[in-house]
């Protein structure tokens, strides 16, 4: 593609991104530590759980509270709504993922300082230990991704108790994790979020796309698409118009191996634990540099499990075994490079 045609095709993306430099997001106290938080969220829990299949999702007023370092209870007014797709639907889950909105003024001098909204990934079947472990496993995958790139949604593990304002349903206590909203990630990295779909691999910065592509293979995740921005966000650098991809959501990955997950029927794999490379076609130089990065970060990646003490020993063992399968393949770079070349997507996915 000539530069002129490339510029013409990218114009809608860059227009949608708005090329003004984003202001800094300020200090994000919530993500300064990886110690698990103890949080209470109070709202009209009964209605919140009941209405999540609506096409127009209702919002609910609530209060997020926690004990600060001095032992005083901090309270932040928040607005909740259900989010997501598969896990939001009642036929799949009893409790949906949550999106929290809050005003900056009311969040000052609290853990939410510097943020505008937060995603909460929470146990979708409270009381079921397998689903509780899925949350902890997915959190571990997020932490592994963060070891490789700064372009990742920051996360924080939490033990959350959901309480009903009218006491019509009993409290629900579960493991969950907060994840940084993409808009806040953009502000933190001085980038703008692109809303338009249809980007091809050639439109993106190749090095971060290579890292993302190999990580999706590492985690055994095929549930992503750059063109459709499915479990992918695109950030544009307003000074250079460079577009970088960000990955998120790994509950359908082989590393988590949730009982409800399955690969798309159009793919040549039968189980999510079957690895399939669906990313960028790598040049020899890019393959070498990307694999060197992965190998250099292996101690950090293997160390994420020490930060998730509630993850059961058998889950740690299974995830380490799954990751070790990748490391064994990486020890034979010629064979791995050949596998990548056979399955890579020349234009995009």
Image: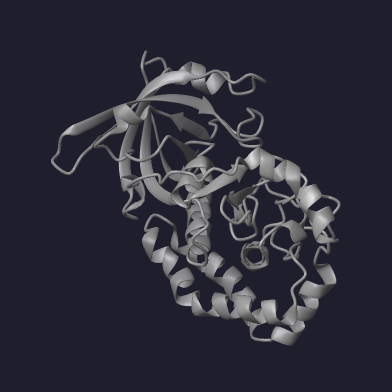
Q: Is residue 18 above or below residue 342?
A: above
Residue sitting at the far front: 4
Residue at x 78% of width, y 46% of height: 198
> Considering only vertical position in the picture, is 94 above or below 8?
above
- When asked about the image quadrant of residue 202, the answer is bottom right
Residue 336, percent from left and from top: 73, 79
In x, y percent, where is residue 320? Answer: 53, 70
Q: Viewer-proximal residue, 42 or 109?
A: 109
Q: How many marks?
A: 0
Left or right, residue 226 beside residue 98: right
In the image, residue 310 lies at what x, y percent?
Answer: 39, 54
Give the percent coordinates (x, y) of residue 145: 53, 61
- Front residue of 63 and 134: 63
**Most distant residue in the left direction:** 70
Residue for point 63% across, 57% down: 242
Q: Residue at x 43, y 24 (%)?
A: 79
- Residue 168 seen in render: yes
Q: How is the image coloured?
A: one colour
Depicted 57 relative to depicted 271: above or below: above
Left or right: 154, with 242 as reference point: left
Kindly tell me whether residue 228 is visible in this rendering.
no
Q: Which quadrant of the view contains residue 286?
A: bottom right
Quadrant occupied by the N terminus? bottom right
Q: Is residue 294 left or right of residue 147?
A: right
Where's the C terminus, which quadrant?
Answer: bottom right
Residue at (40, 44) in percent of width and height: 25
């Amino acid at each position: 593609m000539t530069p002129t045609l490339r510029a013409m095709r990218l114009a809608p993306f860059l227009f949608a991104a708005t090329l003004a430099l984003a202001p800094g997001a300020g200090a994000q106290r919530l993500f300064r530590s990886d110690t698990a938080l103890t949080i209470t969220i109070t709202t009209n829990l009964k209605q919140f759980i009941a209405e999540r299949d609506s096409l127009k999702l209702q919002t609910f007023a609530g209060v997020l509270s926690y004990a600060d370092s001095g032992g005083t209870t901090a309270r932040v007014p928040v607005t909740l709504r259900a989010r997501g797709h598969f896990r939001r639907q009642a036929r799949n889950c009893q409790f949906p993922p949550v999106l929290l909105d809050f005003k900056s003024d009311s969040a000052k001098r609290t853990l939410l300082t510097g943020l505008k909204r937060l995603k909460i990934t929470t146990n979708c079947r409270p009381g079921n230990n397998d689903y509780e472990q899925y949350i902890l496993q997915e959190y571990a995958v997020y932490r592994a991704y963060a070891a490789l790139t700064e372009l990742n949604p920051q996360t924080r593990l939490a033990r959350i108790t959901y309480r009903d304002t009218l006491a019509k349903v009993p409290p629900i206590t579960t493991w969950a994790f907060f994840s940084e909203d993409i808009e806040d990630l953009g502000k933190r990295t001085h980038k703008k979020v692109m809303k338009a779909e249809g980007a091809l691999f050639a439109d993106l910065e190749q090095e971060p796309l290579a890292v993302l592509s190999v990580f999706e293979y590492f985690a055994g995740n095929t549930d992503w698409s750059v063109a459709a921005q499915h479990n992918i966000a695109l950030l544009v650098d307003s000074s250079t118009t460079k577009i970088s991809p960000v990955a998120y959501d790994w509950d359908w990955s082989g590393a988590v191996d949730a009982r409800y997950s399955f690969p798309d029927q159009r793919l040549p794999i039968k189980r999510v634990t079957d690895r399939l490379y669906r990313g960028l076609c790598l040049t020899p130089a890019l393959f070498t540099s990307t694999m060197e990065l992965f190998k250099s970060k292996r101690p950090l990646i293997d160390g994420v499990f020490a930060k998730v003490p509630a993850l059961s020993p058998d889950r740690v063992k299974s995830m380490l075994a799954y990751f070790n399968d990748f490391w064994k393949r990486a020890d034979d770079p010629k064979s791995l490079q050949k596998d990548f070349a056979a399955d890579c997507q020349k234009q995009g996915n």
